[in-house]
Image (cartoon, coloured by chain):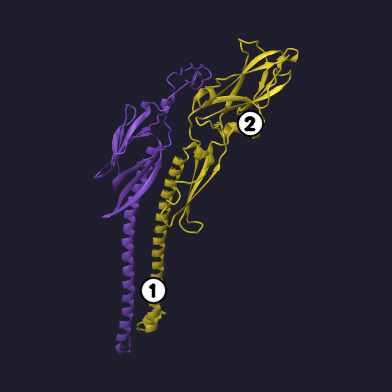
């Protein structure tokens, strides 16, 4: 009975195994390369996300800035507007007593606007400093008023370089940022941001 | 078939094995295609991110360039953002004047064709960054860019009020003169889209007359740029005209600062 059962011949087994080994080898190489590419892509995505967040914050600060202080190497310092909705109530406005019935929302007497005015008084400005340290790029806020938050936070841990290249008269700031995508792989990016607040 | 073969206690034939391997190869190829597709999409995302950065950089350059009033007004080259994108990216900047209702479209909606609008104060700028000729391989960024604030002309030339036709002296009864108010910048270029208020006063140091002023001019859409001075006034018996002088003044507000015409126009009215 056993002699009637026929499996692969040696040649068949060899051919089959070699074909299978070839395919598995190709597949293994493919998976390995794909895994490497995925890992690199993930690291790059993280670095890119960090860079985009940094650039978005930089843009926001520069666009709202009324003054960009002279650049000093890897440090960027500027004064920007800090909006506080309640501060828009003019200090010289007088509240009109609301009628008891029906309740009337808060109203103000019309006041004559002053002939000259300062839309961004010093009390509504904060000083923002970007500083590059070994741990990454830090953003510090120095506020003259206790109602505005002062402090310092790590903005981009992957950022390895910040260079203020130029600040034009029109308020165009040219920046060069470097970010570490993977170990030893540093990518540089030039970016422009434009001041949008016109300050006399 | 395999079950049937196994039930007979027989292994796979070479042909069967080759067919099975073909199937395996097909699946592997499919996987390879999926990997390739995944990497291609990853690459596309990177290109889109890069294109977005280029578009934002270009828009910042456009904003800075347009801060020069002459650049904003004429929008003629050379443009500083040209040829700054690295290959294969190609940057195209398109712009057009954008009309914006003032103070807002919601409040002006009731005025129909007579909406007060800003015609020359905003440009709609679209930055397109393309990396191939495929229709989907493009990133577009659109923004409104405003007319830059300007310095004002000296007081005597800042706010002018001029008659649009020769002014007879005196203006005959029921006669009319159209006056135009204009605001000028430090380069003596007219500042567009400024809204004016025009009023008539009876000067106390002259023989005071009486007249009416019509600022509801459809051609200028309630902007107060033009006003019609009529030599008559409403009387209890209807419309009358008396001789005397009236003074026409214009006021405007620019960048939050109220401006008054420092050179009032005095006209003589005939009875």
Label 2 crowd (10 A; few <14 / some 14-19 / many >=20): some
Horizontal and vertical percent position of residue B81: 44, 47
Labels 1 and 2: the sequence-earlier one: 1
Q: Position of residue A15 (x, y in %)?
A: 33, 82
The residue to which callout 1 is attached is B25
Return the residue nearer the eye: A112 or A32.
Answer: A112
Colour representing chain B: yellow
What crowding class fits label 1: few (fewer than 14 Cα within 10 Å), some (14-19), or many (20 or more)? some
Secondary structure category for the residue under label 1: helix
Q: CA distance from mark 1 to mark 2?
A: 76 Å
Image quadrant occupied by the N terminus of chain A? bottom left
Locate the C terminus of chain A and report the quarter of the image it occupies: top left
Rendered residue at 41%/67% (across/down)? B33
Q: Is residue B182 left or right of residue A126?
A: right
The chain drawn purple is chain what?
A
Q: Is residue A151 left or right of residue B134?
A: left
Residue matched to label 2: B220
Chain of the residue displaying label 1:
B
Confirm whether residue A7 shows in the render. Answer: no
From the top left corner, tell me how far across and down residue B214 is, in percent.
66, 23
């Amino acid at each position: 009975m056993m002699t009637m059962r026929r499996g692969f011949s040696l040649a068949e087994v060899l051919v089959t195994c070699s074909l299978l080994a070839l395919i598995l080898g190709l597949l293994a190489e493919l998976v390995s390369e794909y895994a490497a590419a995925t890992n690199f892509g993930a690291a790059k995505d993280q670095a890119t996300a960090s860079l985009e967040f940094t650039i978005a914050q930089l843009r926001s600060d520069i666009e709202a800035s009324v003054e960009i202080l002279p650049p000093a190497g890897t440090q960027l310092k500027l004064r920007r507007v800090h909006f506080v909705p309640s501060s828009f109530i003019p200090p010289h406005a007088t509240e009109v007593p609301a009628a008891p019935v029906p309740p009337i929302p808060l109203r103000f007497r019309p006041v004559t606007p002053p002939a000259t005015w300062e839309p961004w008084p010093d009390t509504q400005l904060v000083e923002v400093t970007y500083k590059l340290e070994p741990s990454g790029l830090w953003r510090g806020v120095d506020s003259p008023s206790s109602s505005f938050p002062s402090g310092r936070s790590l903005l981009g841990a992957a950022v390895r370089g910040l260079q203020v290249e130029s600040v034009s008269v029109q308020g165009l700031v040219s920046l060069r940022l470097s970010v570490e995508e993977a170990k030893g792989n540093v990518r540089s990016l030039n970016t422009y941001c434009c001041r949008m607040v016109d300050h006399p | 078939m395999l079950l049937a073969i196994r039930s007979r206690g027989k292994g796979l034939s070479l042909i069967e094995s080759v067919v099975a391997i073909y199937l395996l190869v097909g699946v592997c190829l499919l996987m390879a295609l999926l990997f390739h597709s995944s990497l291609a999409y990853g690459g596309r995302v990177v290109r889109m991110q890069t294109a977005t950065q280029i578009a934002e950089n270009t828009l910042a350059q456009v904003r800075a360039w347009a801060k020069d009033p002459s650049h904003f007004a004429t929008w003629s080259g050379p443009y500083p953002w040209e040829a700054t994108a690295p290959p294969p990216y190609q940057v195209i900047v398109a712009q057009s004047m954008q009309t914006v209702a003032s103070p807002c479209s919601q409040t002006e909606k009731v005025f129909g064709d007579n909406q007060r609008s800003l015609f020359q104060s905003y440009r709609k700028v679209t930055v397109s960054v393309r990396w191939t000729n495929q229709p989907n391989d493009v990133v577009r960024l659109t923004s409104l860019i405003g007319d830059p604030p300007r310095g004002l002309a000296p007081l005597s030339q800042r706010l002018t009020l001029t008659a649009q036709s020769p002014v007879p002296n005196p203006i005959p009864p029921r006669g009319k003169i159209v006056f135009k108010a204009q605001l000028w910048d430090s380069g003596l270029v007219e500042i567009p889209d400024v809204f004016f208020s025009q009023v008539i006063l009876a000067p106390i140091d002259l023989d005071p007359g009486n007249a009416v002023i019509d600022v509801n001019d459809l051609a200028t859409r309630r902007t107060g740029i033009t006003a019609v001075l009529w030599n008559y006034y409403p009387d209890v018996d209807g419309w009358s005209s008396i001789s005397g002088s009236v003074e026409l003044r214009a006021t405007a507000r620019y960048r939050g600062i109220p401006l008054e015409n420092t050179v009032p126009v005095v006209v003589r009215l005939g009875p």
